[in-house]
């Protein structure tokens, strides 16, 4: 069984996402010029492309801080491969 890790450190989050080929994104239906919307991690080629819109790292982390989120992630899957499991949670 692999363990989940929680962080609010921007460099750690960015490296984890980029190491897995991910990009910062928002749910397209919630994204506007006035509000980034709901944050997501988009892994191109893994679906959800039409529902997600890529955003800048700057916009991603501004919304991350405004929403007082933490990033919950798994480094390796049970099989030992790099895991893509992640989600945003409220900070403690």
Image (cartoon, rainbow, N blue to C red):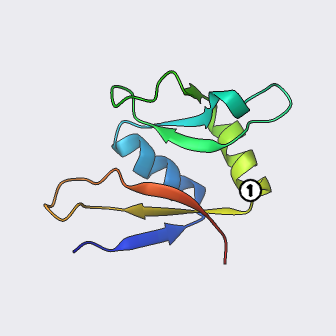
Residue 17 location (% of width, % of height): 43, 46
Residue at position x 64%, y 27% in the image:
28
Mark 1 packing: few (<14 Cα in 10 Å), some, or many (20+)? few
Left or right: where does residue 1 sit relative to residue 53? left
Left or right: where does residue 19 sit relative to residue 36? left
Residue at position x 81%, y 35% in the image:
35
Comparing 51 with 66, the one in front is 51
Which quadrant of the figure has residue 24? Answer: top right
Give the residue furthest to the right: 34
Comparing 52 with 5, the one in front is 52
Residue 87 location (% of width, % of height): 50, 56
Comparing 16 with 88, the one in front is 88
Residue at position x 44%, y 56% in the image:
86
Q: How many marks?
A: 1
Q: Is residue 5 above or below residue 65?
A: below
Is disc 1 placed on a helix, strand or loop? helix
Residue 11 location (% of width, % of height): 54, 54
Q: Is residue 87 above or below residue 53?
A: below
Q: Quadrant of the C terminus?
A: bottom right
Residue 47 location (% of width, % of height): 38, 28
Q: Quadrant of the N terminus?
A: bottom left
Which quadrant of the figure has residue 19? Answer: top left
Give the residue furthest to the bottom: 92
Q: Which residue is mark 1?
A: 65
Residue at position x 68%, y 47% in the image:
61
Give the residue furthest to the top: 50
């Amino acid at each position: 069984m692999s363990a989940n890790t929680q962080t609010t450190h921007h460099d750690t989050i960015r490296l984890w996402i980029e190491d897995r080929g991910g990009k910062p994104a928002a749910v397209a239906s919630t994204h506007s010029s006035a509000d980034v919307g709901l944050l997501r991690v988009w892994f191109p080629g893994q679906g959800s492309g039409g529902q997600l819109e890529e955003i800048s790292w700057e916009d991603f982390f501004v919304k991350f801080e405004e929403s007082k989120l933490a990033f919950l992630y798994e480094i390796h899957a049970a099989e030992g491969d790099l895991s893509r499991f992640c989600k945003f949670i409220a900070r403690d």
